[in-house]
Image: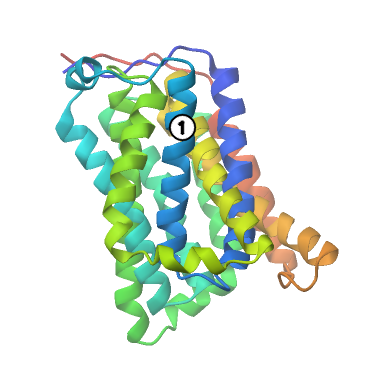
Amino acid sequence: MQLHQTSGRWRLGLALSLLTVFLWGILPIALAVTLQVLDVYTVTWSRFLIAFGLLAVYLASRKQLPTLGELRSASWGMLAIATVGLGLNYLLYLQGLAQTSPTNAQVIIQLAPLFMGLGALAVFKERYNLPQRIGLGILTLGLTLFFKEQLKTLLTAQATYLLGNVILVVASIAWAIYALIQKQLLQKLPSASIMLVIYGGCTLLFTPLAAPQHLVSLSPLTLSMLLFCGLNTLIAYGAFAEALEHWEASRVSAVLATAPLVTLLSVPAVAWLTPSLIAPEHLTVLGVLGAIFVVVGSIAIAIGKNQPQTTEK
């Protein structure tokens, strides 16, 4: 099987990865406001529905909607697995969150981009050179320090948390599988066409769990936050899919690992501007040091010298 080869435009891939990180980093703030009124399933279903609708209108206006012939050129099995993988990631994340806590879930779900990077090394024959391997070690150390208090909680958690943690690990694996298949699908379809199919499929998957009748009673603030979440899904995953076209998946995953830093930097700013919406977070000195290590490690992986990829047939 011929594996996907990147375009080599790594600067564009880096820029798209950073855009994804920013959007994913600020998303929890909007979700926190929205979830004060709506359940998590309706919010997730709405995000996919908004993203699917807007992307369909955009592609139709540019006469770029995928044809049946184009869709047939891709593997329907891979499209189905990618759709189920992303939908399963959302569903299992919510279930794991319900059985543990937000901070606990935030720690475990960071395994997702790491699993993606390790999978890229095995599947796409991407290679880390020595500086990149050192960067991976620094990144891992940084994440450990950054989430020190949460990791302490995990080590001393009661048995009721164990199942939730296992579910979150599976959710991380599901996301990594989706991301790796998404990269392979780029051989046959443009990223926008792939995301249109996945958004539509995920919308159908979440329809039985959603309560759309609650949307008619939303306040202007909650409705605007929900619309932002939908736009966030469209732009962030679109940028992520396009980044995989131009840059190695292992390096994209390294940049994505910095998303929690954006969240923790954004929360104090929003809390200061609008204290009624969200409570501020407080970092310890050890947490700040861990954050620096995460950034340094991610940069080392991202800008390390590129090594040729091999192609399997």
Can residue 138 be seen by looking at this rendering? no
- Residue 28 or residue 231, whichever sits in front: 231
Q: Give me the residue at 46% from left, 41% from top.
A: 51
What is the secondary structure assignment of the residue under circle 1? Answer: helix
Q: Residue at x 16, y 18 (%)?
A: 1
Q: Nearer the viewer, residue 262 or 83?
A: 83
Residue type at the position of mark 1: Leu
Q: How many marks?
A: 1
Residue at 54% over, 60% down: 144
Q: Left or right: where does residue 220 sit relative to residue 192?
A: right
In the picture shown, does residue 61 fall above or below 133? above
Q: Depth check: 49 or 288 in front?
A: 49
| Quadrant housing residue 82 | top left
> How dense is the environment of label 1, judged by Cα within 10 Å: few (below 14), some, or many (20 and up)?
many
Q: Is residue 39 visible?
A: yes
Residue bearing the label numbered 1? 55
- Which residue is at the far right? 273
Q: Is residue 241 above or below residue 164?
A: above
Q: Position of residue 265 (x, y in %)?
A: 73, 55
